[in-house]
């Protein structure tokens, strides 16, 4: 019987061309839409609160939908879930361009997020199937984290340019068109990689009781939550407090993504030398170091590009070192239920970001660096403690 890697049969470069578009589109659908949000109440004849639902519901459905599609991909396969999700995303994106009522627009937005959720969970489950035991997995996970950092930097700029040139409807036509291109590329080439699980191994309980799963998922939450807090506070700090233009802010913000991409290039070598737990440990140490530098900058200096962006370069390296290994660490024992494990992995991460990250921004002041300091200062030490306890348990089990 061929292995999953043999059944997949694609080089790393070909795999990235297949997988990355679905990761990009799920994030781009959120960020490219932001510039036209203020105009949508008048366009749809709805209140600003209703339009806000199109943002909030997208995020909610994107996260919670994975709890549905993860088990479905374990039962029926990655390929059908991926293709169905991409088709739903493409169709609803195009339909949104001709929606004339707020109710129809909100419903289509929910369906768009549903398609994005299905495509995302199938993509990451396939990565887990094929690359769990291979060094290339580090490159893919690191690149995906860089994409999640880069898209928010360029998405709003692209949306503004498209809307100004072609009208707001063109934004959704572009999303739908890109999804159709990705679907056409995947249809003949996305091979099934699922290994059927025995009936007794299906479900969430084996995942939820795993110490390794919780430790590495906490690490993923610490890393990506740090970027979420940065994304939430950077505009207010750099535009409102320093007077940086929107374009200037976008380019400064993008440098953090470029640092993440550059780090991804070397991540495979680092992980080979340090191992999974060693890489996560070093990633968390860099987050703590970045938090210390950010605290000093907030205390001693007036806000500027240098006091915000330069420390974030250090943090960005830590983020990549962490996310390059957290998926493998969390999902290593769940190859037969990888879809469900991936779903819980992202759902837990969304919960930490949504609760802890938002709380830091609200309580500590979103116009300062303190939310970043607080999030890194809380989450990264928790991960280090969890890693130490996990190692102690592993040693005790080995002795027993």
Image (spheres, grey):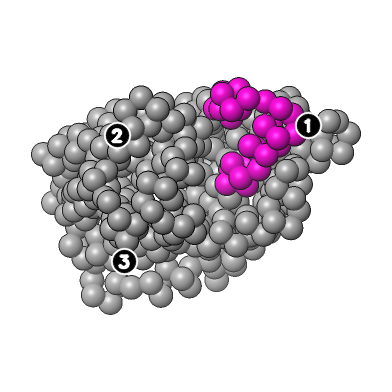
The picture places residue 352, in percent across and down from the top left corner, at 57, 60
User: Which segment is the magenta one?
Assistant: 226-255
Viewer-closest of 153 and 71: 153
Q: Earlier in the sequence, mark 2 or mark 3?
A: 3
Distance from disc 1 to disc 2, alpha carbons, whole Å, reads: 37 Å
Distance from disc 1 to disc 3, alpha carbons, whole Å, reads: 44 Å
Please tell me whether mark 2 sits on a helix, a strand or a loop. Answer: helix
**Residue projecting furthest to the right:** 300
Please give left or right for residue 387 compared with residue 325 in the image: right
Distance from disc 2 to disc 3, alpha carbons, whole Å, reads: 31 Å
- Graded by Cα atoms within 10 Å as few (under 14), some (14 to 19) or many (20 or more), the crowding at tag 2 reads some
The picture places residue 20, in percent across and down from the top left corner, at 33, 37
Pointer 2 residue: 170
Pointer 1 residue: 303
**Membership of 358 in magenta stretch:** no
The picture places residue 353, in percent across and down from the top left corner, at 57, 56
Kindly indicate the quadrant of the structure image that contains residue 160: top left
Q: Residue at x 74, y 50 (%)?
A: 365
Pointer 3 residue: 68
Chief SS of the magenta region: helix
Q: Residue at x 26, y 37 (%)?
A: 173
**Membership of 237 in magenta stretch:** yes
Q: Earlier in the sequence, mark 1 or mark 3?
A: 3
Viewer-closest of 213 and 158: 158
Res. 326 in view: yes
Q: Earlier in the sequence, mark 1 or mark 2?
A: 2
The picture places residue 108, in percent across and down from the top left corner, at 28, 55
Q: Nearer the viewer, mark 1 or mark 3?
A: 1
Figure quadrant of the C terminus = bottom right
For the residues labelled 1 and 3, say whether their Cβ atoms are less than 8 Å apart. no
For the residues labelled 1 and 2, say whether their Cβ atoms are less than 8 Å apart. no
- Graded by Cα atoms within 10 Å as few (under 14), some (14 to 19) or many (20 or more), the crowding at tag 3 reads some
């Amino acid at each position: 019987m061929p292995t999953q890697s043999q059944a997949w049969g694609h080089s790393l470069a070909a795999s990235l061309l297949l997988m990355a578009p679905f990761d990009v589109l799920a994030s781009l659908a959120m960020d490219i839409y932001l510039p036209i949000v203020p105009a949508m109440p008048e366009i749809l004849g709805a209140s600003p609160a209703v339009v806000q639902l199109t943002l909030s519901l997208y995020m909610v459905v994107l996260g919670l939908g994975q709890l549905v599609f993860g088990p479905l991909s374990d039962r029926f396969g990655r390929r059908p879930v991926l293709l169905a999700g991409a088709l739903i995303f493409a169709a609803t994106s195009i339909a949104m361009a001709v929606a004339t009522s707020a109710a129809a627009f909100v419903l289509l937005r929910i369906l768009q997020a549903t398609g994005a959720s299905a495509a995302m969970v199938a993509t990451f489950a396939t990565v887990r199937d094929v690359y769990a035991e291979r060094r290339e997995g580090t490159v893919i996970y690191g690149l995906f984290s860089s994409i999640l950092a880069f898209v928010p930097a360029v998405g709003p700029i692209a949306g503004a340019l498209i809307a100004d040139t072609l009208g707001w409807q063109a934004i959704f036509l572009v999303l739908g068109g890109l999804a159709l291109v990705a679907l056409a590329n995947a249809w003949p080439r996305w091979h099934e990689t699922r290994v059927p699980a025995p009936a007794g191994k299906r479900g969430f309980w084996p995942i939820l009781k795993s110490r390794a799963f919780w430790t590495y998922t906490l690490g993923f939450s610490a890393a990506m939550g740090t970027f979420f807090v940065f994304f939430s506070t950077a505009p207010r700090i750099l535009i409102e407090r320093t007077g940086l233009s929107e374009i200037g802010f976008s380019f400064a913000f993008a440098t953090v993504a470029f640092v993440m991409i550059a780090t991804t290039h070397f991540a495979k070598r680092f992980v080979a030398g340090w191992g999974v737990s060693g890489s996560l440990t070093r990633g968390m140490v860099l987050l703590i170091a970045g938090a210390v530098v950010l605290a000093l900058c907030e205390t001693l200096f007036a806000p500027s590009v240098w006091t915000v962006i330069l420390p974030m370069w250090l943090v960005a390296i830590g983020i990549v070192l962490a996310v390059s290994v957290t998926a493998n660490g969390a999902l290593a024992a769940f190859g037969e239920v990888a879809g469900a494990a991936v779903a819980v992995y992202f759902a837990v991460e969304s919960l930490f970001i949504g609760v802890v990250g938002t709380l830091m921004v609200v309580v500590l002041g979103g116009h300062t660096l303190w939310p970043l300091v607080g999030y890194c200062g809380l989450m990264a030490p928790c991960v280090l403690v969890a890693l130490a306890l996990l190692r102690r348990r592993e040693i005790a089990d080995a002795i027993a």
